[in-house]
Amino acid sequence: MKPTKSLKQQARVAEKAAQEAADEFVANQMKTLASAFRAQAKVLKKKRKKSS
């Protein structure tokens, strides 16, 4: 699996965990983690486009 696709999948899993979390603190942490995964995927995609 490509790194960007893998990061996006991890972001989806983190979002789902955030929705299912009973604790608000944990939910916010999962949302932040999902956002970080998406940002990392975006950077990798930009780097790939630059090098092509």
Image: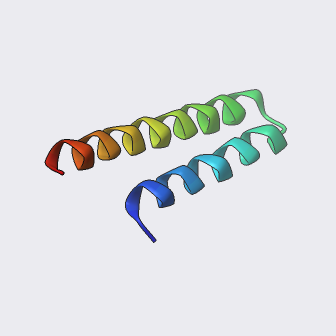
Q: Residue at x 83, y 44 (%)?
A: 20
Which residue is farthest bottom? 1
Q: Tell whether 41 sits left or right of 48.
A: right
Q: Quadrant location of residue 32?
A: top right
Question: Which residue is nearer to you in this view: 31 or 6?
Answer: 6
The answer to whether residue 3 is above or below residue 45 is below
**Which residue sits at x=25%, y=50%?**
48
48 above or below 21? below
Please tell me which residue is depicted at 31% across the width and 39% down the height of the picture: 43
Front residue of 29 and 6: 6
Residue 7: image location, x then y, percent: 48, 53
Q: Is residue 12 above or below residue 27?
A: below
Q: Which residue in the rendered view is the most extreme toward the front?
A: 52
Q: Position of residue 10 (x, y in %)?
A: 56, 54
Question: How did the renderer colour the structure?
Answer: rainbow
Left or right of 18 in this view: 14: left
How far across and how far down the image is residue 14, in percent? 64, 47
Frontmost residue, 37 versus 50: 50
> Which residue does the image show at 29% across and 39% down from the upper left?
46
Task: Kindly indicate the quadrant of the structure image that contains residue 27.
Answer: top right
Looking at the picture, does residue 23 appear above or below residue 41? above
* Residue closer to the observer: 32 or 12: 12
Q: Is residue 20 left or right of residue 17?
A: right
Numbered marks: total:
0
Q: Residue furthest left?
A: 51
Q: Is residue 49 rendered to the left or right of residue 40?
A: left
